Image (cartoon, rainbow, N blue to C red):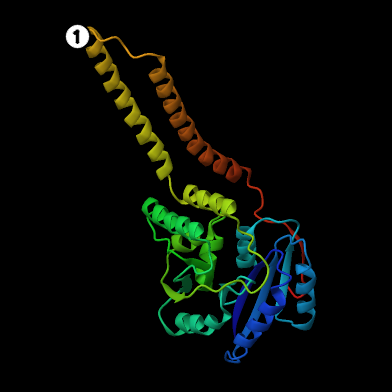
Amino acid sequence: MEKISIIVPCYNEEKALPLFYEELMKNIKDFPKKIEFEILFINDGSKDKTLQIIKELNKKDNQIKYISFSRNFGKEAAIYAGLENATGDYITLMDADLQDPPSLLKEMYKSVTEEDFDAVGTRRVNRKGEPIIRSFFAKLFYKLINKMTNFENVDGARDYVFMKRIVVDAIISLKEYNRYSKGLFSFVGFKVKWLEYKNVPRVAGETKWSFWKLTKYALEAITAFSTAPLVFSSIIGLFFCMVSFLLIIAIIFKTLILGDPTSGWPSLVCIIFMVSGIQLFSLGIIGQYLSKTYLEVKQRPIYIIREKSDNF
């Protein structure tokens, strides 16, 4: 027998869960009988009836297991908990909102078992339904991070990845507290096939990712996988040191040779404000890296379990 573990992180998904379960069951019933399924729901401190619905599904379907956190630790923690507790030979991640189509599961399984691939990832070929400004900044983020890192971050990539056990073991061996799963999937390497599909709108509920949260997530991704911002701040500092040196020479020349008096205080104030702004910007970049180091050094757990199902 082979086992496929399906990990489903959940945060306030009471409206979507029944629809997700129904759609998932439709798509896994056609798999060969030699395959058994483990559907692992990770309740990430939901405040609605998400956990209650998961418990009801667990009672009627022995394939379903669940882990419930003591509070909301974030999707990255939920992904890590799922990967760490999944027992399948093959593991996949899916969102409960059906933006990750279960209809792709069979093709993903065949690609891993019949072709020479260790994992199958999915990527959206469009962002239909998203605000234009959000799509613009998402594309800009992928361009920036690909220039800053030495591995590819695929534009439009989802967390919906079907992996062999060897890939999952490599990912969970990375114990870092500040996690960016898409980057970790790329970092560990292995042979990956990409399946493309058109963007699917949420089946129910509302997105938990505001523009501000996505911006913070993008900054965390960049600082987690690149030191380019530190180099950038150093280059800016060097550049302005050279500019200031040249300006000093120009002022001395104008004053001593040409007899031109030095400029008044407005220009001086502007220069002070500009240089101070650059210093604060550079300190902010350094502060980001220090804060990440601070969190890693404390070695706090990535998640804390409040309860789990009896069939673990």
Whether residue 202 is visible to the viewer of this picture, yes or no, is yes
Q: Number of callouts in the render?
A: 1
Whether residue 87 is visible to the viewer of this picture, yes or no, is no
Q: Is residue 138 above or below residue 194?
A: above
| Between 66 and 287, the one nearer to me in the picture | 287
| Between 96 and 186, the one nearer to me in the picture | 96
Seen at 42% across and 39% down, the residue is: 230
Compared across the picture, whether 97 is left or right of 174 comes to right
Coordinates of residue 190 in the picture (x, y in percent) = 42, 68
Quadrant assignment for the N terminus: bottom right
Single out the residue that lies furthest toward the left. Answer: 257
Q: Is residue 151 above or below residue 252?
A: below
Q: Amino acid at mark 1?
A: Ile
Compared across the picture, whether 300 is left or right of 125 comes to right
- In which quadrant of the rendered view does residue 98 lie? bottom right
Coordinates of residue 188 in the picture (x, y in percent) = 46, 62
Q: Is residue 128 above or below residue 293?
A: below
**Residue indicated by mark 1:** 257
- In which quadrant of the rendered view does residue 228 lie? top left
Coordinates of residue 129 in the picture (x, y in percent) = 53, 68
| Between 71 and 282, the one nearer to me in the picture | 282
Coordinates of residue 113 in the picture (x, y in percent) = 47, 83
* Local SS, label 1: loop
Q: Is residue 52 above or below residue 240?
A: below
Seen at 58% across and 51% down, the residue is: 212
- Dot 1, how many residues are within 10 Å of its Cα: few (below 14), some (14-19), or many (20+)? few
Quadrant assignment for the C terminus: bottom right
Seen at 25% across and 18% down, the residue is: 250
